Structures are given as structure tokens and as C-alpha cells.
Image (cartoon, helix red, strand yellow):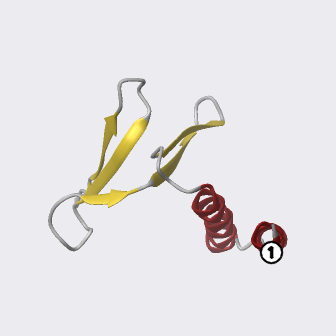
Amino acid sequence: MKQSEIKFTVELDKDSVPEKIYWDATDKGDDGLASTKSVSIALWDHLSKNTMRIDLWTKDMPVDEMKRFYIDCIGGLGQSILSATGDTFMADELNALCDKFIKHLQEENKRLSQS
């Protein structure tokens, strides 16, 4: 049986706020740690029938990038639901929500650039 490992390393400041996040994976393709500004991990606990989540971001991650990150996560969930279950309704609803969020960000950016 093949095994694959994913590893995260988080450097924290004195207040335990992430300053740097690194990741590596056996199937990543290149050697060594890669840096990122955010990671979101969800695990399904089949015994408790609930989700455990870890969401981390570095303190220097811009807010607009954080919002885009979560929009991308939601869109990815839509694709995953479609692939895993074939439920087009749920996938379409999540994609519509992403479109709504993207429009919100565009309007927000327009307001900010006009001020």
C-alpha cells in the first residue's frame, strides 16, 4: 500500500499568532518546504458525525487575499460535492454563492478606490 504524507510547520510569535506557515508533501513534486499565508483543513469525524477544522493564516496576510482564499475554498467544495456525490444542485448553489461573493468584493474594491 502506498502512503502519502502532508506536513505543516507553523512559526508563531510570542502571542502564538502565526508568522509563517510552511508545508510539504511526499507527492508535491519538488523537495523542501513551501511557504503559504493560509491553510484550511477540515476533517470528518465519522464517530461523532461532525467536522473538525483548523484555519490558520499569517498575520501579514492581506484581508482581500483572505476573502479570495475563502471564496476559492467554497468553490472547491462545490467541485468536490459534484465529484463525490453528483449533486448538481448543491454544486450550483455553492458556485452561485461564490459569484455573489466575487461581486461583493468587486463592489467593495470599487468603493475603496473611490475614497
Residue beneath label 1, please? Answer: 110
Name the one closer to the observer, 89 or 14.
14
Vertical side of 106 occupied by 12: above or below: above
Is residue 26 among the parts visible in the rendering?
A: yes
Locate residue 27: give its quadrant: bottom left
Mark 1 falls on what kind of element? helix
Amino acid found under the numbered disc labelled 1: Lys
* Residue found 50% across the figure and 54% down from its top: 61
For label 1, the crowd category at 10 Å Cα-Cα, with few meaning under 14, some 14 to 19 and many 20 or more, is few
Is residue 91 among the parts visible in the rendering?
A: no
Vertical side of 78 occupied by 16: above or below: above
Q: Looking at the picture, how far across and down is residue 6, in whole percent? A: 30, 53
Q: Looking at the picture, how far across and down is residue 2, in whole percent? A: 22, 61
- Number of marks in picture: 1
* Residue found 26% across the figure and 57% down from its top: 24
Q: Quadrant of the C terminus?
A: bottom right
Farthest residue toward the front?
Answer: 115
Q: Quadrant of the N terminus?
A: bottom left
Q: Looking at the picture, how far across and down is residue 50, in whole percent? A: 65, 35
